[in-house]
Every structure is written in structure tokens, then in C-alpha cells.
Image: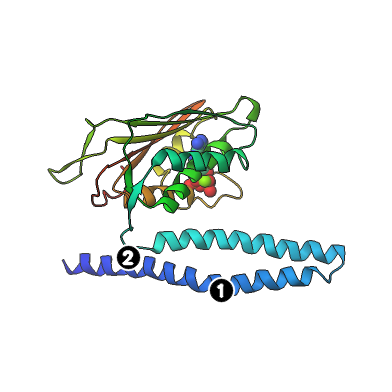
Amino acid sequence: IERQLTHRAAARSVSGMAAVLAHEIKNPLSGIRGAAQLLEQNLSDADRALSQLICAETDRIRKLVDRMEVFGDERPLVKEPINIHDVLDHVRRLSENGFAKGITFVEDYDPSLPPVPGKRDTLIQALLNLVKNAAEAIRDREHGRISIQTAYRPGVRLSVPGTETRVALPLMIQIEDNGPGVPEYLRPHLFDPFVTTKPQGTGLGLALVAKIIGDHGGVIECDSEPNRTIFRILLPTHDQPRLGKPG
Ligand code: ADP
Ligand code: MG
């Protein structure tokens, strides 16, 4: 028992520390960015490129730090009823006009989908990460397709590992792409932090998605084969505790 306790306390303080550090890094970072931006006005073209580089790189750190903050935050989510279709429309708009330009979007929404208890910002963050990965996997944009599907399946129940409990996860969201697929060797580690195949990747996207969906009492799974990758999220329609890491 003692060992377990020590272990849990350590885990708590590591993630707690991540959140505190993330917060503390943000202030000096925005100072650096602001100064670099001011400098830019009085610089020659060659030096201006350098100050722009400082801005771009601080933006990269900022993104990392934002993610660290979410990971480290162990407070229970403050939830409100969320219309998932609204959230998906928002994600689609952001994607279509940004990183997913040129890719065809297909949507198949189940009109009977009830609201889900959740936090809008973090749900957007999670779904945006999935669509971003899909867009990044698609090489040929002209033939690239991302399908977004929802379904309400009141019969679906899932057993909680190690207990007799079964929870209802009737709400389904699927993001599907026709990119090359997730390499086989990667699949068992897909949701682990720092797993990436991209030269500039952080490998934090899917770990963050899994944390957010877990915080909502849901699960996420991946089905992938060449030219077809599906990320499927199952969510409860009533507030229920975290289910833990996806299996
Ligand atoms: P990052 O995007 O920074 O690499 P992620 O955690 O978002 O980190 O994704 C981890 C890895 O999973 C990616 O590098 C990629 O190899 C793989 N992956 C994720 N989504 C897809 C997808 N839709 N199709 C193919 N591979 C994917
Ligand atoms: Mg990613």
C-alpha cells in the first residue's frame, strides 16, 4: 500500500509541476515574443528574418506549453451540455479554411444525437487534433477525403476493466480519412505521448486527445488499414467518472 501511495503522490506532483511550469513559462515567453516583434521595426531585412524566426519559434514553444498545461491539469472538468454537431461544424470550418484546404469533407450527422456533458474548448481541441492528423496523413489533397460521422446508439455498453460495472457510451463520433493508414508497428503506441513519425511532430496530439476524451468519461479507438483510417470516440450522455487509459 505504501509503495502505491508514494507512486501516486509522485505522479500527481509531476503532472502538477508540469501545469505550474507551463504557466510560469508563458509570461517570459510572451515577453520575448513582444520584444522580438518590436525589434523587427528597426531592423534591416536580413535581421528582420532573424526576429521573425524568434517569433515563430516562441509560437512553437507556446503551443507545447499549452498542451503541457492541459496534461498537467487534474481538476475535474466543469461540464455543460454540448451540441456536438455545432462543435464539429466549427472544427470543420477552421480546418477547411486552414490546414486542410483542398481536401474534401463529407459529413454524416445523426440528427437524434443528444447533447453531451462536456467542455466545449477542450472538445474542439481534441477533434481539431484528429482532423489535423487526418489532413497531414493525406498526401494527395485532390483525392483526399475526410469523413465526419456521428451516431446515437443507446444499446452500446462497455465494461470497465477490473470491475463488474458496465457504462453506457451511446454517443459516437468518427473521423475517417483515406490517407495511407497508421503503420502497423505504431498502432499499440498510438496514444502514448512523444510517439511521432513526423520530423516536426511533438507526438502529443493523440495523447492529448485521449486525455480529453477520458476526462469526458469516454474512450477513443483507432481502426486503420491502407487508405482508410478511422478514429472512433464513444461518449456518455450523462456525467460519469473517468474510464482511464484506452486499451
Ligand atoms: P504528431 O501529429 O505530432 O506526430 P500525434 O500524437 O498527433 O503526434 O500522432 C502520432 C502519430 O500517429 C503521427 O506521427 C502519425 O504517424 C500517426 N497518425 C496519427 N493520425 C494518423 C492518421 N489519421 N493517419 C495515419 N497516421 C496517423
Ligand atoms: Mg498530431
Q: Quadrant of the N terminus?
A: bottom left
Classify 175 as above or below 43: above
Residue named by callout 2: 11
Check disc 1 and give the amino acid type: Asn
Check disc 2 and give the amino acid type: Ala
Classify 131 as above or below 27: above
Is the CB of mark 1 within 8 Å of ligand 1? no
Provide residue 94's location: percent of width, then percent of height. Answer: 57, 43
Which type of secondary structure does the marked residue at label 1 adopt? helix
Q: Which mark is residue 27?
A: 1
Residue at 43 percent of width and 43 percent of height: 190
Q: Quadrant of the C terminus?
A: top left
Q: How many marks?
A: 2
Is any atom of residue 196 visible in this view?
A: no
Judged by depth in the image, the label closer to the viewer, 2 or 1, is 1
Residue at 34 percent of width and 70 percent of height: 13
Residue at the extreme right of the image, as rendered: 44
Neighbor class of circle 2 (other Cα within 10 Å; few <14, some 14-19, many 20+) is few
Neighbor class of circle 1 (other Cα within 10 Å; few <14, some 14-19, many 20+) is few
Provide residue 83's location: percent of width, then percent of height. Answer: 38, 42
Report the front residue among 86 and 132.
86
Tell me which numbered mark, 2 or 1, is placed earlier along the sequence.
Answer: 2
User: What distance separates the C-alpha of mark 2 from that of mark 1?
Assistant: 26 Å
Is any atom of residue 172 visible in this view?
A: yes
Provide residue 220's location: percent of width, then percent of height. Answer: 36, 41
Residue at 86 percent of width and 63 percent of height: 45
Provide residue 121's location: percent of width, then percent of height. Answer: 44, 53
